[in-house]
Image (cartoon, rainbow, N blue to C red):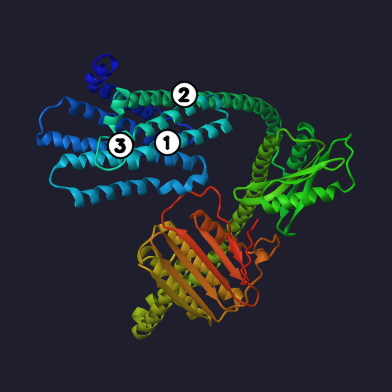
């Protein structure tokens, strides 16, 4: 070491440390930037630890460079030496975690290594603690030298060889995934890590083996070159190979972009075909609201437009038969169809309907059958069965057509319901007008027969009293008393008529007193026991809602008194924060629910009118009844008014729990 290159290296050792640290620090920064990529490669999830290793190890080497140039032995330099050793150990721990995590991500057989980082770190700390207890004499320098040596033995060497192994495992994964062009760079990185681990055996001289024989002093005697130079060269080569490996992300991005462009082109082609078929089919589906016409035209268009379909059948669920039934079918004129086609189509359609998924019959010598479910929301409404003579290349088109067919079927059914409801409303309006006229006739008749005659008699009596006042005052006074009773009776009759038209309690006192008065009046007039109870905090409601509830109760109680032959009626009014509930139950003879919607002269117009009132308030009406078991009516109306575009159906529920919806 008297001149030449060895002397140059020894005199420029701080520069070697600086370049050594720079190589690791720059590599760590590059890896950190690449680890933030949106990549599907598993390598991405382990790169942050490799980046942290490079940055931490680079800072450690720079501190070592500073310590070589510093003079003195003050406490600040001792603390800086301790920080350097901590960074060295931390960098090796990060390297171990990088290797272990990468191998676990790439192959499950390396799962037993998952605790390697923790175990090696624990071993290192135990050795430091043992040395501190057994040999520490107050001098920090031997302790830090021991910590440096043990960090390389217990953490650096295992971490380097684990990292080399991880590079080889990653090479196999890259070859499987089609990135074989990076295998040489991974081999180079593995060799660099392995040599880096070997050079970690060269530690500062110490009294214990192997540091007493294999150390920086003996290495320098044999090679005339400091080991730091070899470490710097190996570190720089490793950084170069790692950076070259990171180019895999650019290759992956290019492949993903190419795949996306290819898929987009294929999608555009399929979309063009779909749009052509969908346009024609949707034009047919929107041309009519008649369900039968719509289904026949739609299946004809599907069979004639989609290859290789030769026949098709549309099945819809029939609630009365509790099964799917064929509603429309079509086949090509020149198609040779097997004799059992209809049964095969029905079987596959039933499978698709029950499973709510595609049902496929494997191809035979002539044809195959494919069935697609027709699902509205989460409820299956039927299935479409298609017979084809070849393989489908445009299954997405059929699925889209099935969805469009569902929409068309729902629109047609909604149109039918709207037509029925409009017809029902027209009939209700006629009944309302007729009821108004009947009420006017009744009032006119009662005013003429009762109040009119009473007032006429009262006028004649007053005339006769005027003549008696002078001749017979005693008789005149008696006649006046009789006339007072007649006038009081007339006033009572008028008040009753007014109460029947619009009870004053409803406007003055509110719904609860008006219903209680109605219950008391009905109990007094009939032989029934009428019980009225309330629940919840009572309060005044908006006038329209109180009127609706009052008329509902009036109609229900009148029906119970006239038709049910009930002995007891219970009326319950429940107030809650969001809704008002009216529940009326009797123990009468009940009725068959079918008569509510049956178009007969005895149709239940009163119940239908009640449904209309509840619908206008945005609420729901439930009717429970069965012949011989009484009846129960429950109305739920929200307290906050809201517009109602489609009337809520009345739930007609017999005691068995079976629900029937009108229309």
The residue pinned by badge 3 equals 213
Which mark is on residue 337? none
The residue lying toward the viewer, choosing from 286 and 238, is 238
Q: Residue furthest bottom?
A: 474
Identify the element where label 2 is drawn.
Answer: loop
Point out the tag, 1 or 3, that comes first from the N-terminus.
1
Is mark 1 in CB contact (under 8 Å) with mark 3? no
In-image side of 416 versus 249 (left or right) = right
Is mark 1 in CB contact (under 8 Å) with mark 2? no
Point out the tag, 2 or 3, that comes first from the N-terminus.
3
Which mark is on residue 247? 2
Residue positioned 49% across, 28% down in the render: 187
In-image side of 595 versus 234 (left or right) = right
Residues under labels 1 and 2: Cα distance? 19 Å
Q: Is residue 394 visible?
A: yes
Q: Is residue 458 visible?
A: no
Identify the element where label 1 is drawn.
Answer: helix
Residues under labels 1 and 3: Cα distance? 27 Å
In-image side of 11 versus 114 (left or right) = left
Mark 2 or mark 3, which is nearer to you? Answer: 3
Place of residue 318 in the rendered image (x, y in percent of width and height, measured from the top left): 72, 55
Which mark is on residue 163? 1
Mark 1 or mark 3, which is nearer to you? Answer: 3
The residue lying toward the viewer, choosing from 458 and 204, is 204
Place of residue 387 in the rendered image (x, y in percent of width and height, measured from the top left): 80, 41
Q: Quadrant of the N terminus?
A: top left
Place of residue 613 in the rendered image (x, y in percent of width and height, measured from the top left): 52, 58
Q: Residue furthest top?
A: 4
Residue positioned 47% across, 67% down in the render: 582
Residue positioned 52% across, 23% down in the render: 254
Label tally:
3
Is mark 2 in CB contact (under 8 Å) with mark 3? no
């Amino acid at each position: 070491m008297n001149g030449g290159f060895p002397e140059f290296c020894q005199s420029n050792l701080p520069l070697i440390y600086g370049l050594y640290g720079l190589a690791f620090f720059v590599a760590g920064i590059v890896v950190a930037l690449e680890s933030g990529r949106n990549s599907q490669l598993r390598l991405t999830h382990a790169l942050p630890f490799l980046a942290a290793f490079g940055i931490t190890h680079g800072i450690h080497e720079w501190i070592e460079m500073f310590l070589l140039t510093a003079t003195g032995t003050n406490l600040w330099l001792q603390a800086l030496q301790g920080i350097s050793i901590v960074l060295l150990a931390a960098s090796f721990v990060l390297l171990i975690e990088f290797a272990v995590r990468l191998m676990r991500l790439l192959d499950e057989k390396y799962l037993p290594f998952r605790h390697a980082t923790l175990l090696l770190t624990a071993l290192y700390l135990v050795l430091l603690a043992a040395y501190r207890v057994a040999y520490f004499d107050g001098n920090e320098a031997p302790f830090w030298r021991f910590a440096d040596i043990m960090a390389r033995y217990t953490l650096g060497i295992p971490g380097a060889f684990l990292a080399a192994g991880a590079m080889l495992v990653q090479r196999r994964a890259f070859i499987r995934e089609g990135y074989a062009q990076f295998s040489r760079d991974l081999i180079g990185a593995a060799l660099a890590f392995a040599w880096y681990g070997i050079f970690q055996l060269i530690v500062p001289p110490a009294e214990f083996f192997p540091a007493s024989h294999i150390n920086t002093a003996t290495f320098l005697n044999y090679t005339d070159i400091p080991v730091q130079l070899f470490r710097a060269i190996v570190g720089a080569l490793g950084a170069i190979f790692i950076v070259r490996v990171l180019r895999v992300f650019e290759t992956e991005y290019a492949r993903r972009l190419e795949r996306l462009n290819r898929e987009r082109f294929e999608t555009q082609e399929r979309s063009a075909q779909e749009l052509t078929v969908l346009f024609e089919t949707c034009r047919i589906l929107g041309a009519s609201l008649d369900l039968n016409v719509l289904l026949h035209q739609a299946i004809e268009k599907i069979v004639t437009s989609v290859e290789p379909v030769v026949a098709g059948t549309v099945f819809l669920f029939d609630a009365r038969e509790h099964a799917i039934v064929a509603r429309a079918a079509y086949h090509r004129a020149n198609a040779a169809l097997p004799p059992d086609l209809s049964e095969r189509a029905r079987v596959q359609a039933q499978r698709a309907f029950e499973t709510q998924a595609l049902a496929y019959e494997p191809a035979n010598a002539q044809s195959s059958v494919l069935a697609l479910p027709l699902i509205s929301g989460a409820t299956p409404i039927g299935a479409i069965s298609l017979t084809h003579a070849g393989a489908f290349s445009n299954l997405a088109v059929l699925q889209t057509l099935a969805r469009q067919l569902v929409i068309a079927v729902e629109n047609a059914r909604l149109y039918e319901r709207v037509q029925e409801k409009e017809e029902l409303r027209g009939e209700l309006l006629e009944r309302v007008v007729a009821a108004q006229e009947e009420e006017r006739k009744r009032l006119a008749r009662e005013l003429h027969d009762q109040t009119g005659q009473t007032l006429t008699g009262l006028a004649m009596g007053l005339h006769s009293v005027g003549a008696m006042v002078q001749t017979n005052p005693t008789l005149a006074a008696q006649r006046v008393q009789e006339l007072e009773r007649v006038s009081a009776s007339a006033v009572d009759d008028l008040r009753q008529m007014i109460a029947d038209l619009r009870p004053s309690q409803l406007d003055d006192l509110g719904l609860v007193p008006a219903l209680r008065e109605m219950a008391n009046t009905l109990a007094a007039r009939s032989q029934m026991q009428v019980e009225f109870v309330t629940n919840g905090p009572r309060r005044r409601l908006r006038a329209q809602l109180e009127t609706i509830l009052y008329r509902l109760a009036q109609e229900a109680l009148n029906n119970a008194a006239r038709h049910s032959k009930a002995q007891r009626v219970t009326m319950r009014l429940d107030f809650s924060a969001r809704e008002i509930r009216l529940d009326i139950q009797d123990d009468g003879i009940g009725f068959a629910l079918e008569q509510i919607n049956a178009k007969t002269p005895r149709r239940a117009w009163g119940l239908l009118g009640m449904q209309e009132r509840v619908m206008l308030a945005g609420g729901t009406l439930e009717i429970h009844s069965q012949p011989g078991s009484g009846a129960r009516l429950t109305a739920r109306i929200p307290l906050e008014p809201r517009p109602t575009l489609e009337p809520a159906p009345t739930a007609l529920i017999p005691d068995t729990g079976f629900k029937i919806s009108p229309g």
